[in-house]
Image (cartoon, grey):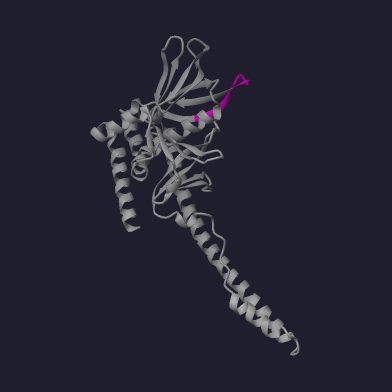
């Protein structure tokens, strides 16, 4: 059932090699496939599985038109005149293609649709890169802790040097100086080790439940950027691909979480007298995060029509939407309840 869900569609042109002409239509993405349908005739001119793709590239046709090419088995598909722009379409297609290769469901689908040697090589490279990134993140986290300890030590040394400086001033001052006794008392009474500055709100970010890769759109901006969505017991954290925090939504500050499709949500915080803060997030792993969002923001959730059917099907016939996604959602719910009990 989830294979028929349309994640996104974009107006574009497709080069029909049999007729040697460009045909206007819509390029559509589902959780497992890419399709192109002609506008006038309504014909399905191209349809192939994500796991059969071995390369997605940005190219130019005849050195003039910016195009997107998808190499599927031995066939090269050309798409141009992409709206809103080529970069948006490329980022979304690449995200779902990569996640399909890495997911266990993608591996099952590849048993039906044979994978090329190039696809196997790419899958191996992606897995290796993911492992190296995880190892690098652990090293950076350890180095960050060491840096924090060094900063605390330096602040303590600085505080002690201030006290020592005042003591020396007291000893060097002549006995007849009327303020000699006050120079010593002031620092001893008020001297406290300085604490390292902390990021606003960082103390509340505890109890990580799940973190997923996501494509992020901020406000009304049409561009999408790769990043991550982290769901914590205390709120939501949105960060870029370099793990720099773009925004932290405290649980009490979120006004609405809108589920557009099982793979796309938007989070909004409203203000009076100034613009709202909103982010739109698209992810192949979003079906695993939605059950947690339902637990955290049950009264603030809004399901659009494209998402309602998926939610009903998940509750009544979980086997029909993919057992692995359903089981992952149940596991994340149990994890969320466990963390809340601990807190």
Name the residue: 45% across, 54% down: 205
Identify the magenta region.
56-65
Measuring 36% from the left and 45% from the top, which residue is drawn there? Answer: 296
Horizontal side of 39 relative to 5 (left or right) equals right
**Residue furthest front in the image:** 273
Q: Is residue 321 above or below residue 233?
A: above
Write the residue at 52% across / 34% down. Answer: 224
Q: Position of residue 131 (x, y in %)?
A: 44, 48
Front-lying residue, 88 or 300: 300
Give the total of numbered labels: 0
Say whether residue 27 is visible: yes
What is the magenta segment's predominant secondary structure? strand
Q: Quadrant of the N terminus?
A: top left
The image quarter in which residue 81 lies: top right
Q: Eyeballing the image, is 265 above or below 62?
A: below
Residue 107, given in percent of the width and then of the height, sits at 34, 36
270 vs 281, nearest the viewer: 270
- Determine whether, in the image, residue 188 is placed left or right of residue 305: right
Image coordinates for residue 104, horizontal then vertical, percent? 34, 39
């Amino acid at each position: 059932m989830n294979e028929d869900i349309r994640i996104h569609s974009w107006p574009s042109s497709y080069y029909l090699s049999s007729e040697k002409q460009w045909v206007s239509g819509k390029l559509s993405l589902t959780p497992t496939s890419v399709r192109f349908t002609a506008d006038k005739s309504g014909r399905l001119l191209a349809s192939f599985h994500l796991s059969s793709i071995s390369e997605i590239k940005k190219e130019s046709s005849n050195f003039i038109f910016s195009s997107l090419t998808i190499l599927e088995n031995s066939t090269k598909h050309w798409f141009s005149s992409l709206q809103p722009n080529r970069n948006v379409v490329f980022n979304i297609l690449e995200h779902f293609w990569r996640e399909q290769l890495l997911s266990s469901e993608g591996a099952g689908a590849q048993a039906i649709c044979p994978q090329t040697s190039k696809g196997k090589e790419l899958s191996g490279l992606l897995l290796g890169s993911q492992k190296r990134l995880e190892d690098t993140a652990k090293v950076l986290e350890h180095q960050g802790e060491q840096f924090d300890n060094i900063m605390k030590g330096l602040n303590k040394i600085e505080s002690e040097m201030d006290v020592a400086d005042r003591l020396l001033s007291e000893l060097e001052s002549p006995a007849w100086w009327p303020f000699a006794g006050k120079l010593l008392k002031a620092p001893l009474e008020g001297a406290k080790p300085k604490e390292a500055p902390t990021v606003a709100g960082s103390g509340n970010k505890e109890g990580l439940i799940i973190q997923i890769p996501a494509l992020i759109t901020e406000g009304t901006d049409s561009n999408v950027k790769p990043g991550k969505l982290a769901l914590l017991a205390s709120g939501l954290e949105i960060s870029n691909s370099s793990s720099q925090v773009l925004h932290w939504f405290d649980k009490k500050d979120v006004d609405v979480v809108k589920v557009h499709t099982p793979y796309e949500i938007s989070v909004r915080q409203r203000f009076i007298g100034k613009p709202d803060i909103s982010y739109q997030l698209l992810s192949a792993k979003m079906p695993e995060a939605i059950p947690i969002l339902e637990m955290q923001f049950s009264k603030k959730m809004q399901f659009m029509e494209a998402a309602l059917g998926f939610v009903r099907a998940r509750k009544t016939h979980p086997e029909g939407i993919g057992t692995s996604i359903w089981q992952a959602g149940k596991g994340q719910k149990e994890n969320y309840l466990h963390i809340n009990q601990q807190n």
